[in-house]
């Protein structure tokens, strides 16, 4: 299998390494490619949009044409996972910050997102979460966004008090935290299992 | 799920280093006003560095350079949605406490400002906010990481618009990391003593074949080609200080440098990006600087 990690900005290398590790543990053979230009996403069995600055990532993927390829892949059923900035990028509905910065969204998931929902870096935190289908999980939130509400067809898999921090819509996965920053590869494994099908 | 808010863990090493990792592949721009911060955000900067004066003006003004007025920093924080960083003097932990209280996202303990402590850097582990520090070589970089820095940048020679020193520092650091490869435990211990760095960090760097934290280029980057050069030498991203707002057309230069970091290894696209940007900042030949005018020798 081939997994693309959108590589224009953010913690791309961490996702590549976590995905490779998950591949190995699952016994899947394949490659994981950081993608900075168009032409590769379309040929992939799964796409990951990493953490980073969502304003920057959005500008670069739309400018380069990677955005259209992600939309096409997602609509054809290829699994796409977005973490942190990726969760924002996948969404249909932005908040006032998204509007103010003129940030374009992929508009794939029926989610209402809020950027920097928990505050600035000093309000960033780690916490033990319960994730549906995964169980107890140490989640790392860095200037993290959150989902305020979801439309029909979106399954909420993780919540932190009033905020939705994990959601699945058919072949699309969104997490507000960073599974790529810890050694726990269960989320990447879940994603790869979807890509395998 | 209802989580007891007391169970949230703040300011951990993972969160500090993780924040720095989110900046990778990005451009962090020096700004002195809310308007400039907006321009930087619109251009695609991953963060801004809020300053009273850009390094070129600090250099020209002389005297003691200090932390910026918190009011300017606050205005910049209120004007953009991306992270805001700010500088403190080397060793000035009170300035750092003030910036932490203000809520800046990262503190740059910077040689660009006049050092406040000739002996010690700030004990950065005491803070919840992450720090970035400058380094000219592997010893400096690992000492700063040992003190708690979550991110390293080359010192270069700030405010000169001359990339030569940033190149020198990046080559020295990357070269030293390559040299660690294949060294035995005894040799690594000897090397650690020689560069006055903790053995554990030398060992970790040898294993990883990179610094244990994100490593950016800074100090003299003025054009898209400069940004590409630093990325090709192994930088994780770039800081641009005076290079944007001392150029003829800051909006275009800012956008071009952001694109150049993404296309750093694609000369054909870089050629397009570099066309007709107007005059970059004028700059200074490092060889015309007296030793005491160099900022990079501060805080080793």
Image (cartoon, coloured by chain):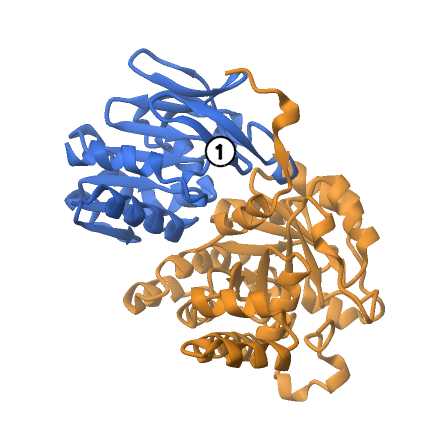
Chain colours: A blue, B orange
- Which quadrant of the rendered structure holds the N terminus of chain A? top left
Residue at screen point 79% across, 47% down: B97
Relative image position of residue B224 (x, y in whole percent): 44, 66
Number of on-image labels: 1
Relative image position of residue B299 (x, y in whole percent): 73, 71
Can the viewer see residue A6 in this picture?
Answer: yes
**Nearer-the-camera pick, A59 or B137:** B137
Give the crowd class for mark 1: few <14, some 14-19, many >=20 residues within 10 Å: many
Relative image position of residue B52 (x, y in whole percent): 75, 55
Quickly name the residue at label 1.
Answer: A139
When the figure is inspected, residue A169 is found, relative to residue B31, above or below; the finding is: above
Can the viewer see residue A114 in this picture?
Answer: no
**Nearer-the-camera pick, B43 or A117:** A117
**Chain that bears disc 1:** A
Residue B114 horizontal side relative to residue B206, left or right:
right
Image quadrant where residue B8 sits: top right
When the figure is inspected, residue A1 is found, relative to residue B31, above or below; the finding is: above
Residue A150 horizontal side relative to residue B2, left or right:
left
When the figure is inspected, residue A190 is found, relative to residue B242, above or below; the finding is: above
**Nearer-the-camera pick, B282 or B168:** B168
Residue B251 horizontal side relative to residue B156, left or right:
left
Q: Secondary structure at mark 1?
A: strand
Residue at screen point 37% across, 29% down: A174
Residue at screen point 32% across, 29% down: A173
Relative image position of residue B85 (x, y in whole percent): 65, 50
């Amino acid at each position: 299998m081939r997994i693309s990690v959108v590589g224009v900005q953010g913690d791309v290398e961490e996702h590549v390494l976590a995905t490779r590790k998950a591949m190995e543990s699952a016994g899947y053979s394949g490659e994981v490619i950081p993608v900075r230009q168009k032409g590769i996403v379309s040929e992939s069995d799964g796409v990951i949009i990493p953490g980073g600055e969502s304003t920057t990532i959005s500008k670069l993927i739309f400018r380069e044409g990677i955005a259209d390829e992600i939309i096409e892949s997602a609509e054809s059923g290829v699994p796409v996972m977005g973490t942190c900035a990726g969760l924002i990028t996948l969404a249909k509905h932005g908040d006032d910050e998204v509007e103010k910065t003129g940030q374009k969204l992929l508009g794939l998931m029926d989610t209402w997102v809020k950027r920097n929902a928990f505050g600035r870096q000093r309000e960033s935190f780690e916490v033990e979460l319960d994730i549906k289908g995964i169980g107890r999980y140490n989640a790392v939130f860095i200037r993290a966004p959150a989902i305020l509400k979801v439309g029909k067809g979106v399954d909420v898999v993780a919540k932190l008090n009033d905020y939705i921090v994990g959601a699945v819509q058919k072949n699309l996965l969104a997490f507000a935290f960073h599974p790529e920053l810890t050694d726990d590869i269960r989320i990447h494994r879940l994603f790869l299992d979807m890509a395998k099908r | 799920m209802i989580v007891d808010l007391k169970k949230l863990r703040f300011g951990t090493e993972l969160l500090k280093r993780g924040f720095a990792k989110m900046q990778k592949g990005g451009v962090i721009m020096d700004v002195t006003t809310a308007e400039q911060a907006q321009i930087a955000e619109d251009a695609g900067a991953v963060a801004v560095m809020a300053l009273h004066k850009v390094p070129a003006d600090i250099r020209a003004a002389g005297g003691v350079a200090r932390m910026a007025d918190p009011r300017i920093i606050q205005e910049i924080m209120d004007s953009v949605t991306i992270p805001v960083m700010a500088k403190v003097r080397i060793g000035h932990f009170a300035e750092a406490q003030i910036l932490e209280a203000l809520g800046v996202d990262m503190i740059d303990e910077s040689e660009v400002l006049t050092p406040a402590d000739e002996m010690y850097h700030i004990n950065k582990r005491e803070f919840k906010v992450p720090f970035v520090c400058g380094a000219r070589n592997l010893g400096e970089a690992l000492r700063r990481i040992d003190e708690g820095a979550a991110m390293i940048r080359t010192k270069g020679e700030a405010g000169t618009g001359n990339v030569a020193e940033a190149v020198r520092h990046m080559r020295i650091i990357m070269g030293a990391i390559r040299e660690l490869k294949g060294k035995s435990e005894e040799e690594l211990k000897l090397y650690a003593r020689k560069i006055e760095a903790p053995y554990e960090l030398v060992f970790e760097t040898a294993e990883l074949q990179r610094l244990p934290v994100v490593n950016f280029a800074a100090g003299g980057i003025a054009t898209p080609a400069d940004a590409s050069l630093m990325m090709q030498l192994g930088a994780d991203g770039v800081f641009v200080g005076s290079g944007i707002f001392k150029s003829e057309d800051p909006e275009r230069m800012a956008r071009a440098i952001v694109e150049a970091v993404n296309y750093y290894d694609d000369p054909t696209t870089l050629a397009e990006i570099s066309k007709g940007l107007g005059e970059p900042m004028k700059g200074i030949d490092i060889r015309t600087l007296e030793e005491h005018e160099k900022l990079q020798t501060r805080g080793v």
